[in-house]
Image (cartoon, rainbow, N blue to C red):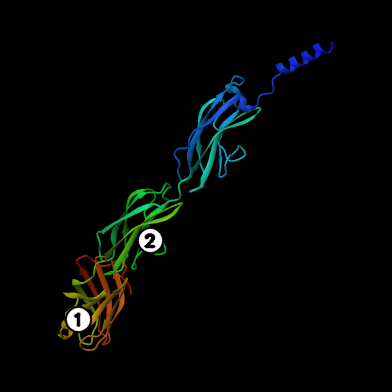
Amino acid sequence: MRGLPSLLLLLLLLACTKEAASPTDLFRVITTKVTGVGITTAQSGGQVISGVQTSSADIIARGVCFGQFPNPTIADPKTTDGVGAGEFVSNLTGLLPGTKYYLRAYATIAQGTVYGEEFFFTTLPLQLPMVITRAATDVTHSGATTGGDIVNNGGLPVIERGFCFGLSPNPSLDDNKILSGTGTGVFTSLLTNLCTDQPYYVRAFATTGAGTGYGNQIQFTTGALSGLAEYSTTVLAAQNDFSQCLPSISGSVQLVKESSGDYSISDASFGLYGCVYFFPPATGVSLTVDCGVIFLGGSDQGSKSYTLTSVTTNGTELTIEWINSAGDAARTTLTRTGGWPMNLHL
């Protein structure tokens, strides 16, 4: 009987001794549902509710942890969003596009870390920008104004935009291109040094980190050089005396389109035949403009062929020097309504 009081005392002490509380007994964590999911971003957060045995000051870290596998921990990627009890917001960045993530809030005290409920979400996939190509305006024999509109950047900044163009359908960045700034919205560009009398295909484009998006294709045809051209010719050489033709001969010729880029000339001597020899105009000779390259072809009614030896233009006037197989030579300046392409050369 003498040991009974000691036993009762021991049992009483054990009953009064509390087991050390775990972190989950001391406070609670609630995870906020995920919102604002983008291509590489999302938003969540949580709430830390302290318990009877803890105060707000005991919460030394809080945030959300996330990863591509269930039950992420603070050993995985995480945010750090302050300390203490209460609500907090977590902004997730640097996520992978089109990827499923698991997420839960956490809070840490000295004894350990407690996690909230787990949620999962999937980031948006990469999307190419949406682009519209507008109809070309102010089309000339060697240029046009093109327009585009980026209506959606796909969630990523537009780092380059402009127009692809060429003589074949569906032009891309591998073809001719002209840049026109960055960002979304409406933009325009002037295409220059185009080939005369040719069908051009154009697509607006925009480039982001997801790649390049193209707009619809539009088509236009540059202007031809047919029509009336006024000339002023200075004779440089002839088989007869040509003093009566100095300082220059003035008149006009018709350029008649025979096919794309090819024109017959109503007088290939540009007045020299009539002034020097009292001959009729030199016919049968063609003027060809092939993407800026200009040359004469064929022979006149006297079987004389013609060759250009010099070509210069300022856009308003075209000055050529030419010689025929008989030795006649002259310098002729031509003007026409609409001017001349700036890229003409031998």
Q: Which residue is mark 1?
A: 272
Q: Amino acid at mark 1?
A: Leu
Q: At 54% across and 41% down in the image, what residue appears?
A: 102
Upstream in sequence: badge 2 or badge 1: 2
- Can you give x and y, in whole percent of width and height, for residue 81 in the image? 54, 32
- Can you give x and y, in whole percent of width and height, for residue 234 in the image? 22, 76
- Can you give x and y, in whole percent of width and height, for residue 153 in the image? 39, 49
**Which quadrant: the C terminus?**
bottom left
Q: Does residue 217 appear left or right of residue 42 in this picture?
A: left
Q: At 44% across and 39% down in the image, what residue appears?
A: 36
Q: Is residue 248 visible?
A: no
Q: Amino acid at mark 2?
A: Lys
Q: CA distance from mark 2 to mark 1?
A: 44 Å
**Which quadrant: the N terminus?**
top right
Q: At 21% across and 69% down in the image, what residue appears?
A: 335
28 over 196 or under it: above or below: above
Among all residues in the image, which is located at the extreme bottom?
Answer: 303
Q: Is residue 176 visible?
A: yes
Local crowd size for mark 2, using a 10 Å CA cut-off: few (<14), some (14–19), many (≥20): many
Q: Which residue is mark 2?
A: 177
Quarter of the rendering containing residue 115? top right
Q: Which mark is residue 212?
A: none
Q: Does residue 335 appear left or right of residue 25 in this picture?
A: left
Secondary structure, mark 2, is: strand
Q: Are marks 2 and 1 in contact (CB under 8 Å)?
A: no
